[in-house]
Image: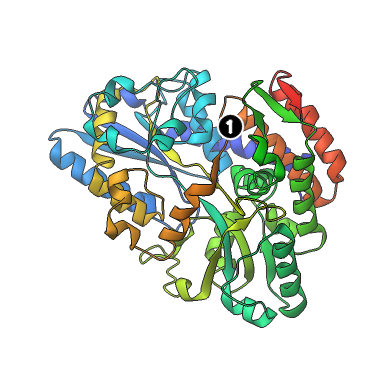
């Protein structure tokens, strides 16, 4: 069902309840033992996916072996992205519940810094030779507006179009496929709808339940492919230090989303607004041949590797990859967004020194390479990126790594999480048909003024 006020109230109650569970899960606080480092991370909502769990268990074993007398307490938070962020921020508010180390999405870095939740790591990084191996763009993603660094990135990502070769064959669409414009993408989806009944032609994440996936995999992959992107960031004006309202590019991106759902090219609205939509896409729709085109991230194969619970060794033969085109095919012709996650130390952590020792073990060259391969990530250590065993580890790695040359990064300033939510609300309104594109864009402009303290400019 589309999210209505009653559903929103229900979701709020779920968040409160799950946040309370997260607080309880942390026990008596990170400072309860000077010899134990508590590590909190996002656990997949799919019980069969254990990529992060297995990786951390291996690092835990190595760390405890090399640090006699020290222990690692892994504290997983099983939740969709948006709920994970809520739970994590609840935990970071008190020394009684703050872990020693947390898995932090880069888009939250500045807002959590502003809230006083994270500890600057510069003193540690200055003494760690491996920090010089990390690429500059990755370092920037973990840097606060105060110039200090608050996280160690564990990889980055890019985004593109995944397509089912079998469905394309039935629809009469030649492969390999590389659309040149947005219209080419929609035309392919329409051909699938006409000729291959019973499958979803095109998935574009949308609405508040999908959280940042809707904003970044969906909306921003469109917005940053408009003509406006050639003249600077289409969300935030770096010169005036203000957020952009009244944008035709914003309406164009919103119109694409509206078309997908109005013309029934996307998933049913009830499915599109399911908080577990990403798990549904990766674990059901794609592997079972129920989805023609998916606008999504480089990390999808992690769910299909041996031991993942959704093993799908045939995926390189079944799926093709295409770059998302710019709106009208204008230069550079394709677009991607990049983000990623970092390991950060809470300001109220009880054992920060031990936590950084764990980071050093986790982010050694060998362990970093192991993680990039396991989670289908893009390397942020230059020595790993140049390692043939990484480049050839699985199909798609080179394709997504090459997209770094045309990628964009979100303006991850303190207000960004609220701006992202306002984007999701606009997307959801046109997805359900509750608002027209013009009305949804106007409501976004109004919300933008509220969440940025009127730091808004027109373009």
Percent position of residue 445, x then y: 79, 30
Percent position of residue 139, x then y: 40, 33
Whether 199 is drawn above or below 210: the answer is below
Question: Colour scheme used in the picture?
Answer: rainbow
Question: Based on the displayed image, in which of its 4 quarters is residue 33 positioned?
Answer: top left
- Going by the image, does 439 lie left or right of 50? right
Front one among 327 and 366 = 327
Front one among 404 and 148 = 404
Whether 47 is drawn above or below 104: the answer is below
Question: Based on the displayed image, in which of its 4 quarters is residue 140 positioned?
Answer: top left
Quarter of the image that includes the C terminus:
top right
Q: Residue at x 58, y 72 (%)?
A: 164
Crowdedness of circle 1 by 10 Å Cα count: few (<14), some, many (20+)? some
Which residue is labeled 1 in the image? 411
Q: Is residue 420 visible?
A: yes
Question: Based on the displayed image, in which of its 4 quarters is residue 100 positioned?
Answer: top left
Front one among 289 and 12 = 289
Q: Residue at x 45, y 75 (%)?
A: 314
Residue reaching furthest front?
A: 331
Q: Is residue 267 visible?
A: no
Percent position of residue 18, x then y: 54, 38
Percent position of residue 440, x then y: 82, 40
- Going by the image, does 187 lie left or right of 326? right
- Going by the image, does 235 lie left or right of 127? right
């Amino acid at each position: 069902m589309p999210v209505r006020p009653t559903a929103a109230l229900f979701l709020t109650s779920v968040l409160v309840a799950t946040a309370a569970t997260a607080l309880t899960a942390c026990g008596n606080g990170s400072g309860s033992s000077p010899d134990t480092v508590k590590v909190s991370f996002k656990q997949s909502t799919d019980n069969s996916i254990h990529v992060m769990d297995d990786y951390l268990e291996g690092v835990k074993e190595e760390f405890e072996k090399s640090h006699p007398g020290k222990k690692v307490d892994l504290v997983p938070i099983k939740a969709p992205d948006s709920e994970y962020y809520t739970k994590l921020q609840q935990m970071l508010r008190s020394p009684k519940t703050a872990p020693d180390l947390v898995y932090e999405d880069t888009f939250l870095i500045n807002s959590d810094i502003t809230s006083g939740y994270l500890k600057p790591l510069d003193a540690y990084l200055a003494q760690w030779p491996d920090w010089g191996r990390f690429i500059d763009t990755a370092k920037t993603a973990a840097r606060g507006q105060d110039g200090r660094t608050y996280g160690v990135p564990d990889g980055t990502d890019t985004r593109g179009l995944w397509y089912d070769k079998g469905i394309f064959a039935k629809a009469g669409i030649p492969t390999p496929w590389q659309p040149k414009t947005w219209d080419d993408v929609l035309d392919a989806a329409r051909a699938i709808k006409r000729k291959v009944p019973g499958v979803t032609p095109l998935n574009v994440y949308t609405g508040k339940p999908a959280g940042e996936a809707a904003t970044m995999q969906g909306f921003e992959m469109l917005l940053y492919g408009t003509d406006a992107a050639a003249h600077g960031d289409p969300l935030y004006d770096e010169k005036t230090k203000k957020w952009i309202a009244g944008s035709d590019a914003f309406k164009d991106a919103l119109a694409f989303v509206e078309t997908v759902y109005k013309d029934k090219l996307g998933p049913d609205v009830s499915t599109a607004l399911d908080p577990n939509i990403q798990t549904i896409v990766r674990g059901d729709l794609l592997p079972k041949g129920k989805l023609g085109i998916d606008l999504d991230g480089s990390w999808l194969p992690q769910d299909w590797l041996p031991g993942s619970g959704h093993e799908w060794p045939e995926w390189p033969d079944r799926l093709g990859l295409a770059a998302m085109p710019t709106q009208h095919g204008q230069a550079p012709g394709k677009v991607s967004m990049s983000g990623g996650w970092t390991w950060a130390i809470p300001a109220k952590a009880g054992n920060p020194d031990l936590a950084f020792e764990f980071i050093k073990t986790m982010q050694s060259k060998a362990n970093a390479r192991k993680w990039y391969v396991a989670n289908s990530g893009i390397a942020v250590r230059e020595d790993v990126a140049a390692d043939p065993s990484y480049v050839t580890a699985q199909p798609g790695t080179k394709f997504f790594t090459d997209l770094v040359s045309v990628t964009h990064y979100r303006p991850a300033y303190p207000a960004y999480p609220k701006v992202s939510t306002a984007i999701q609300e606009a997307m959801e309104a046109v997805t359900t048909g509750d608002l027209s594109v013009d009305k949804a864009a106007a409501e976004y402009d109004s919300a933008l003024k509220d969440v940025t303290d009127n730091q808004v400019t027109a373009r």
